[in-house]
Image (tube, grey):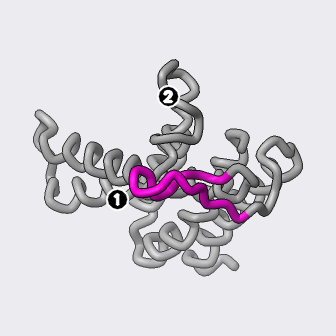
Amino acid sequence: MHRSGHYGVALLSYAPVLYVLASQGRFAAGVAGAGLVVALTLLPDVDLSIPLLAHRGVTHTLAFAAFVGAAAWAAVWFAPVELASRELLAPGVGGLAAFAILAHLFADALTPRGVPLLWPLTDSRFSLDAGPADSVLWNVGLLVLGAFASVAAVATAAGVY
């Protein structure tokens, strides 16, 4: 999956969350959350830069999503700065970090190669085989769909329709 496809799936996945937050008047929190999800959604592909890691290996698992979520939670919880609502912010950031990784895994699971979601329990790969990873049309289409869903979520929540 190309970057554009990953960004699209992340935005599409986050759109319902964005709608709920925007409809509660928490637009800034919704946009900040979207920014965090988009910023972290490519993190599993760090394996492309680490010589000893296979692509779509350990960084493309539920265990990695849990690890990233816990690390983000700890980074906020133990941050050496004063935070107004650390008790709410830490789990929110941790949850969104894990969400971003899960969006990446879902995007890669759409491709024929799939992902080893349940590693280390099994090396079996999970794939929906919905489209090829290298298709420009597929990747750009996902980006357009994700952007549309995000705009629609905000417009609907704001009553703009």
- Dot 2 or dot 1, earlier in sequence: 2
- Residue in the image at 49% along x and 38% along y: 43
- Residue in the image at 78% along x and 63% along y: 130
Q: Which residue is mark 2?
A: 53
Residue 72 at what x, y percent from top left? 29, 45
Q: Which residue is mark 1?
A: 95
Magenta-drawn stretch contains 116: yes
Residue 38 at what x, y percent from top left? 54, 47
Q: Quadrant of residue 87?
A: bottom left
Q: Quadrant of residue 95?
A: bottom left
Is residue 13 visible in the rendered image? The answer is yes
- Dot 2 falls on a residue whose secondary structure is loop
Magenta-drawn stretch contains 20: no
Q: 136 or 14: which is nearer to us?
A: 136
Q: Which residues are magenta?
A: 114-128
Label 2 Cα crowd, 10 Å radius (few <14 / some 14-19 / many 20+):
few
Q: Amino acid at mark 2?
A: Leu
- Dot 1 falls on a residue whose secondary structure is helix
Drawn side of residue 20 relative to residue 125, left or right: left
In this view, 15 is above or below 28: below
Question: Which residue sits furthest top?
Answer: 51
- Residue in the image at 30% along x and 53% along y: 94
Is residue 98 visible in the rendered image? The answer is no
